[in-house]
Image (cartoon, rainbow, N blue to C red):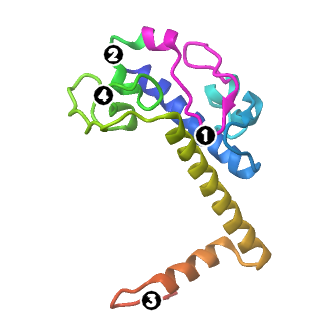
Amino acid sequence: MSQSSPACGHLRTIDSVVDQYAIENNKKTNDPVSVADWTSYVKKGSPLYNTGNSIFGTAYGLQTVDQLPQVFSSDYNVLSDVAGTGFWSPYGPWENRVSCLGIGSARKRTPEPPRMKKSLQAKDYAALGAFRHAMRKLLRFSKELVATRAKLTAQYDALLAIKGSSGANGVRVER
């Protein structure tokens, strides 16, 4: 499983950095993101940053906002003896969706997740994409609001924590 974990880690990283790129560059659902754009958000000096390729040299290529990156069938086939279909979820085959997210192991049988009564339709994916886009807009709005009011983000977060605390002990500020 030594090669399958980094391969799945690449997919999680790509998913995350494409979202970050979309937030910072005001991109919307289905906008393309070039390799140069998404790799600039990856840890500098890492193999993924340097090449934009999988551990087997397959180019990840152009990505799309609000669409999950997918494991290449060639990489999946090479690793299928140590990482079953469930390991790659949500970045590959949809059976046994647990292990790539850090729950369970491809060698150990994991409990089956609850089955949905119906499969997701195109409209469901469109709604999820719209939700992710709205969340990015909210995050951007919040950052812009803080900047226009000349408050530091940390100060803003602290004020929200103080205002939002409803505990019996309240909030204490100490040196």
Upstream in sequence: badge 2 or badge 4: 2
Tell us which disc is closer to us: 2 or 4.
4
> Which residue type carries mark 1?
Asp
Q: What residue range appears in magenta?
A: 52-77
Whole-number angstrom distance, CA of label 1 to CA of label 3 = 41 Å
Mark sitting earlier along the chain (1/3)? 1
| Circle 4 SS class | loop
- Residue ID at (70%, 33%): 39
Split into 4 quadrants, where in the image is the N terminus?
top left
Q: Earlier in the sequence, mark 1 or mark 4?
A: 1
Helix, strand or loop at label 3? It is: loop
Q: Nearer the viewer, residue 73 or 170?
A: 73
Q: Magenta residues: mostly which secondary structure?
A: loop
Residue depth check, mark 3 versus mark 2: number of the one nearer the observer: 2
State the residue position of label 1: 66
Q: Secondary structure at mark 2?
A: loop
Mark 4 closeness class: few <14, some 14–19, many ≥20 residues within 10 Å: some
Check disc 3 and report the residue beneath it: 172
Q: Which residue is mark 4?
A: 96
Label 1, label 4: how far apart the Cα atoms are: 22 Å
